[in-house]
Amino acid sequence: MPSNPASLYRKVFPTAHRLLVERIINRRLREAHGDVLVVGAGHDPYGYLLSQAKSVCRTDISDEYGNIDLVADVHDLPFEDGSFDAVVAIEVIEHLRSPQEAVAEIFRVLRPGGRIFVSIPFMYRVHGDPYDFTRFTAGGLKELFDAFDNISVQEVSGRLHVISDIITTAARPLAALRILNHLLALPGICTPSKDCPSGYWLEAAK
């Protein structure tokens, strides 16, 4: 089972990528309104940010987490066309065998004007859940989501953050060094990199 990003250990010793993407999540997910679909919800560590939603349907490919409303594969969602006002996919796209099929399904179940909120790693270690298939550049993400309008792709971090994550995820004894990521994440320490970010935050509308 993947570890819970809301656990005390992950909060004290976060990867730089996780720390910085959570900063964006805490700001942007509050914009998800109406009927919201969460794909790959896992432990549902960000559900509390969806308090403005009319309803929230949390899905994942397994029911082992205990926080899932429905077991569902994002490649073949069991919902009618135009069922949701927003779809959330946090660190999910890289684990999908066919991102193109999944994004087409997300587009299908969104209502006109509906929004997507996506985070995805780029310069970040291979990690299971149980599989890790894909990395996209900013240009690749715009191509993947080209059926959508008003596509915004934001770099999550800079080179120092990427280097920190490479080092501190190389061996378990080095994990304690992740506590320094709290300093690296301070404003002005390291600006986001256009060509070497740890990942991206994407938003778009149907």
Image: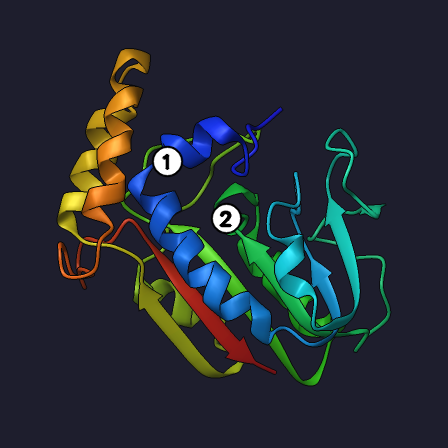
What residue do we see at 73% from left, 40% from top? 61
Is 154 above or below relative to 181? below
The image shows residue 199 at horizontal and vertical percentages of 33, 53
Which marked residue is nearer to the observer: mark 2 or mark 1?
Answer: 1
Q: Give whichever of discs 2 and 1 has the lower sequence position.
A: 1
Name the quadrant containing residue 1.
top right
Give the label on residue 197, or none: none
Judge the density around disc 1: few (<14), some (14-19), many (≥20) Cα neighbours within 10 Å: many
Asked if the residue under mark 1 is in contact with the one under mark 2, i.e. CB atoms within 8 Å, the reply is: no
- Which residue occupies the foreground of this view, 102 or 187? 187
Q: Is residue 205 left or right of residue 42?
A: left
- Which residue occupies the foreground of this view, 86 or 100? 86
Name the quadrant containing residue 51.
bottom right
**Circle 2 — which element?**
loop
Disc 2 designates what residue?
Answer: 91
- Which residue occupies the foreground of this view, 74 or 194? 194
Indicate the amino acid at tag 2.
Glu
**Circle 1 — which element?**
loop
Indicate the amino acid at tag 1.
Pro
The image shows residue 87 at horizontal and vertical percentages of 65, 66
Is 80 above or below relative to 11? below
Q: Is residue 173 left or right of residue 115?
A: left
Is 151 above or below relative to 90? below
Disc 1 designates what residue?
Answer: 14
What residue do we see at 69% from left, 76% from top? 33
